[in-house]
Image (cartoon, coloured by chain):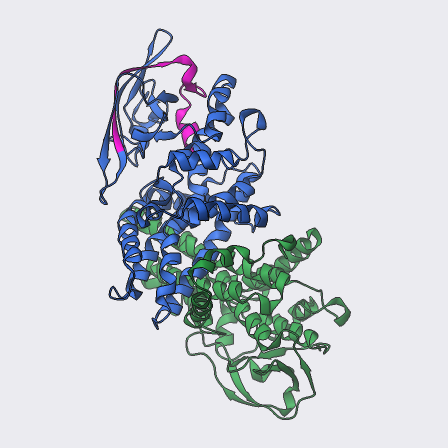
Chain colours: A blue, B green
């Protein structure tokens, strides 16, 4: 295949010990998680849980110790992630900071920004939201219009962001904003910049939006003359597009892109023993899970080597989304409601609803397939 | 490892060059008419390819399974006009049973499976359900034709006379079956990659409505799915080969079965997409596309179809229960130096 590489990677030698530690911790921490928590998986927000995770050194694992990190490898971090996701742990309060905002600050932030934010992320005390989509800018992200304009000592933000997951519970947002008008319609990727925005600043109004399952998962955020000091510009003014898209490789590469619905398979399995059609369906699901895991590990290995596998990440996310969406449908075919315990039925219902978000969040299926097609040489 | 990768690279290049120079659609069509690719086989033998999996002490190259998978994928990319993958496995099984593999085409006979190009074999390695290996000379075997109606690749079913020698597979019948499964999964992965490349080239050149059909999102999105399936098949096969290197063929049933399931599903999904892209021209006898797609559809059924392997994997998982599902998935190949 032209240019797409998936070299097999082993999990690190530390993996078995790390897993044992995590499983003990998660068994205790998760003993009272209801089906809905596990179904929401990494969209679930639980500050107390995140602080406990932070105490154990499982946030910012790869970052320098000077900023509170653990200087461990990307593949060790991968093991921690997949263990959390396999049980549907509510990781959202530290997850975005660990996955995206922290790495962005490490790469492009000022020394002051790193010292200010990274240690608190590592402790699980600082929750981040990602401010990208707007009411009129979804997949066509570069058409966004929320503006940051020069003001004495900083910038003034006006406009709206929408679909921002958990923003009403978070502390900070990394927002992609327009800092100068596009030079022409084709230059819309220019003039964008990234900012750290304190979500408690005056002028910010956050309105939670109920999702189809009745949860307040995402939001609409209105910025009315919100002041951001110069010190909170991230990276270079006008380079926001390049910075934000490089970040997407991190956002798309992880095991969260195929594991979102796995807790349902674990929960449902024991009640399928007497179902004659179950072995074939379960076998197909496991064959795919093992394969997606190898593909996801290959991408994690490339990140560890300092390669930005933007296209491979898009492919794994797309294939993973198909898988995690198919899983509840396949299991539903096997489940006899009369013989399925209520908590498993509840989880099936929740996953069936939440699954619609898998192929929307972090890049829609159509956008990802467009990236793969371009990699194939189709124009 | 570096040395192995070097050997793998050399072998892939040899297979690629051999089949580019002396293979191609005409040779594949001739094979379907029952014409043994004599020249191709002679060249493969001159390169030592059929014995590559046998240890050096037995005249082979001591190739590992992950390397073999890469070689079989290369073979599949050219439609596998000759039964080289099967012969490589036959030689490997002979060596495992303590019998030195001979020169010439050594055919592989697995329980219940037809034998590729059986009547062209000089020798046959027959494995029974108990893991016993019988080494036969062609002279004592009667053959009934059993060409696959889908691929039209020549195959025969044997009635054996007395064997020359017998031996025992340390890994039992399962190890032989798993090798047969792995080789067909890898051939599928290679053939799908070739079909995808053909479809992408075609989509970039064929024009309708004033532009290449590959400029249409409807076509792009389909080919992206095909690429994703092809990538999954290749990764699943490589992972299965690696598992066989580390835990023996008999210890790698999950990965090898998974590779067959994923490659088989990919052949179905991906094969449908490439034909849709080629439209009518791809439906003609004249166009070479079907030489690849018919083969990969046929290979799906060899040495255990998706259904068979999925059931085995599923039964094992159901017996172990939900609590063990994730720990089992992550424990394979982890720890003990990833052995």
Q: Tell me the residue at 51%/48% (across/down).
A: A297
Residue A235, position in %: x, y? 45, 21
Query: Nearest the camera: A42 or B92?
Result: A42
Question: Is residue A132 visible from the viewing direction of this image?
Answer: no
Total number of numbered discs in the rendering: 0
**Is A230 inside the magenta-drawn segment?**
yes
Q: Position of residue A246 (x, y in %)?
A: 45, 33
**Rendered location of residue A287, percent (x, y):** 45, 61
Of residues A352 and A160, the one drawn nearer to the viewer in this rendering: A352
> Which image quarter: residue B151?
bottom left
- Does the image show residue A305? yes
Q: Quadrant of the C terminus of chain B?
A: bottom right
Magenta region: A219-247
Residue with the most extreme right position = B57
Query: x, y (%) of residue B235?
Result: 51, 56
Front residue of B72/A136: it is: A136
Residue A180 lies in the magenta-colored region: no
Against A243, is B171 above or below? below
Q: Residue at x 30, y 47 (%)?
A: A36
Q: Indicate whether A259 appears above or below A230.
A: below
Q: Nearer the viewer, residue A144 or A195?
A: A195
Classify residue B70 as left or right of residue B46: left
Residue B284 lies in what quarter of the image? bottom left
Q: Residue furthest top?
A: A152
Residue shown at the point (65%, 77%) measured from the top left: B169
In the figure, is residue B71 to the left or right of A130? right
User: Which residue: 56% across, 36% down?
Assistant: A306
């Amino acid at each position: 295949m032209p240019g797409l590489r998936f070299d097999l990677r082993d999990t690190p030698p530390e993996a078995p010990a790390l897993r044992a530690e995590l499983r003990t911790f998660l068994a205790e921490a998760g003993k009272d998680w209801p089906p809905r928590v596990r179904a929401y998986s990494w969209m679930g927000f639980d500050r107390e849980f995140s602080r406990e995770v932070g105490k154990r050194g499982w946030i910012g694992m790869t970052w320098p110790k000077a900023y509170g990190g653990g200087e461990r490898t990307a593949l060790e971090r991968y093991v921690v992630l997949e263990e959390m996701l396999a049980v549907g742990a509510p990781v959202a309060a530290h997850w975005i900071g660990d996955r995206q905002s922290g790495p962005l600050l490490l790469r492009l932030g000022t020394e002051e920004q790193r010292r200010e934010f990274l240690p608190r992320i590592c402790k699980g005390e600082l929750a981040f939201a990602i401010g990208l989509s707007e009411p009129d800018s979804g997949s066509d992200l570069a058409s966004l219009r929320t503006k940051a304009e020069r003001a004495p000592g900083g910038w003034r933000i006006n406009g709206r962001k929408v679909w921002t997951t958990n923003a009403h519970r978070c502390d900070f947002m990394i927002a992609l904003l327009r800092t100068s008008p596009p030079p022409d319609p084709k230059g819309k990727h220019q003039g964008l910049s990234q900012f750290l925005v304190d979500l408690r600043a005056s002028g910010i109004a956050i309105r939670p939006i109920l999702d189809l399952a009745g949860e307040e998962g995402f939001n609409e955020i209105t910025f009315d003359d919100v002041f951001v000091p110069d010190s909170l510009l991230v990276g270079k003014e006008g380079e926001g597009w390049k910075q934000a898209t490089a970040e997407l490789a991190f956002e798309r590469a992880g095991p969260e892109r195929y594991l979102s619905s796995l807790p349902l398979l674990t929960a449902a399995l024991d009640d399928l023993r007497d179902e004659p059609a179950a072995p074939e369906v379960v076998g197909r699901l496991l064959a795919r899970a093992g394969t997606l895991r190898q593909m996801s590990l290959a991408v994690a290995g490339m990140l560890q080597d300092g390669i930005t596998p933007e296209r491979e990440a898009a492919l794994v996310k797309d294939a993973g989304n198909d898988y995690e969406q198919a899983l509840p449908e396949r299991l539903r075919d096997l489940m006899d409601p009369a013989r399925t315990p209520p908590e498993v039925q509840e989880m099936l219902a929740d996953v069936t609803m939440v699954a619609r978000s898998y192929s929307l969040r972090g890049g829609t299926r159509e956008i990802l397939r467009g990236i793969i097609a371009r990699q194939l040489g189709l124009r | 490892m570096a040395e192995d990768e070097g050997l793998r690279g050399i072998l892939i290049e040899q297979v690629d060059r051999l089949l580019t120079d002396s293979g191609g659609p005409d040779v594949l069509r001739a094979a379907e008419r029952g014409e043994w690719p004599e020249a191709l086989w002679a060249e493969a033998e001159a390169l030592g390819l059929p014995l590559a999996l046998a240890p050096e002490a037995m005249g082979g190259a001591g190739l590992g399974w992950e390397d073999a998978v890469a070689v079989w994928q290369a073979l599949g990319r050219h439609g596998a006009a000759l039964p080289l993958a099967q012969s490589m496995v036959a030689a490997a099984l002979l060596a495992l049973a303590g019998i030195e593999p001979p020169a010439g085409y050594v055919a592989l006979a697995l329980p219940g499976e037809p034998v590729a190009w059986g009547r062209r074999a000089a020798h046959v390695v027959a494995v029974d359900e108990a893991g016993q290996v019988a080494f036969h000379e062609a002279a004592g075997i009667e053959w009934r034709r059993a060409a696959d109606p889908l691929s039209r690749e020549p195959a025969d079913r044997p009635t054996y006379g007395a064997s020359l020698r017998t031996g025992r597979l340390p890994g039992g019948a399962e190890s032989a079956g798993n090798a047969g499964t792995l080789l067909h999964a890898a051939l599928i992965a290679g053939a799908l990659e070739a079909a995808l490349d053909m479809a992408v080239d075609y989509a970039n050149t064929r024009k309708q409505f004033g532009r290449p059909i590959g400029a249409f999102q409807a076509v792009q999105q389909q080919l992206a799915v095909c690429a994703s399936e092809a990538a999954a098949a290749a990764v699943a096969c490589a992972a299965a080969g690696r598992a066989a290197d580390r835990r023996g063929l008999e210890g790698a049933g999950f990965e090898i079965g998974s590779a067959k399931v994923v490659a088989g599903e990919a052949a179905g999904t991906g094969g449908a997409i490439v034909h849709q892209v080629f439209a009518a021209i791809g439906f003609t006898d004249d166009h070479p596309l079907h030489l690849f797609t018919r083969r990969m559809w046929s290979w799906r059924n060899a040495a255990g179809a998706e259904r068979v392997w999925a059931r085995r994997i599923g039964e094992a998982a159901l017996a172990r229960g939900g609590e063990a599902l994730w720990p089992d998935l992550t424990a394979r190949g982890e720890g003990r130096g990833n052995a």
